[in-house]
Image: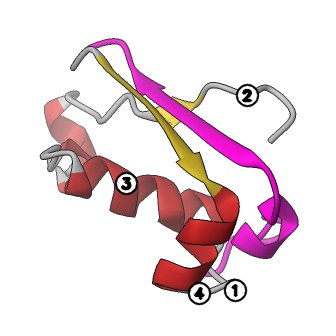
Amino acid sequence: MQAYKGARTLFDFAGRKIHVECLKCEIRRRYDGDAMIARVGRNVVMPDLLNRIARGNGCFLNDAPTPNGIRCRMHYADVRI
């Protein structure tokens, strides 16, 4: 887990849905916050969770070095995050 100053944790989304999407890969998913907490733990920061979700959906661009200009475009679809 990386340190993201001020990043919210998964615990903040207990009882809520987590919406993610990648328009490049045409992926749109909705996850239950409580189920995700049970699966990965409540202290996971949201940027790390996004990377885990992207990898779980078959995207490895989030691990790609930045100089190639190709980046994962997975993001949280809910602007309140």
Q: Nearer the viewer, mark 1 or mark 4?
A: 4
Q: Are marks 3 and 2 in contact (CB under 8 Å)?
A: no
Compute the Cα span from label 1 to label 2: 20 Å
Residue 53, numbered label: 3
Contact flag, marks 1 and 4 (Cβ < 8 Å): yes
**First to last magenta residue range:** 1-24
Mark 4 neighbour class, 10 Å CA radius: few under 14, some 14 to 19, many 20 or more? some
SS at mark 2?
A: loop
Task: Give left or right: position of 23 versus 50.
Answer: left
First reached walking from the N terminus: tag 4 or tag 3 = 4
Specify the label residue 41 is tagged with.
4
Question: Label 2 belongs to which residue?
Answer: 78
- x 62%, y 25%: residue: 77
Residue 10 magenta = yes
Q: Which of the 4 image quadrants contains residue 44?
A: bottom right
Q: CA distance from mark 1 to mark 4?
A: 6 Å
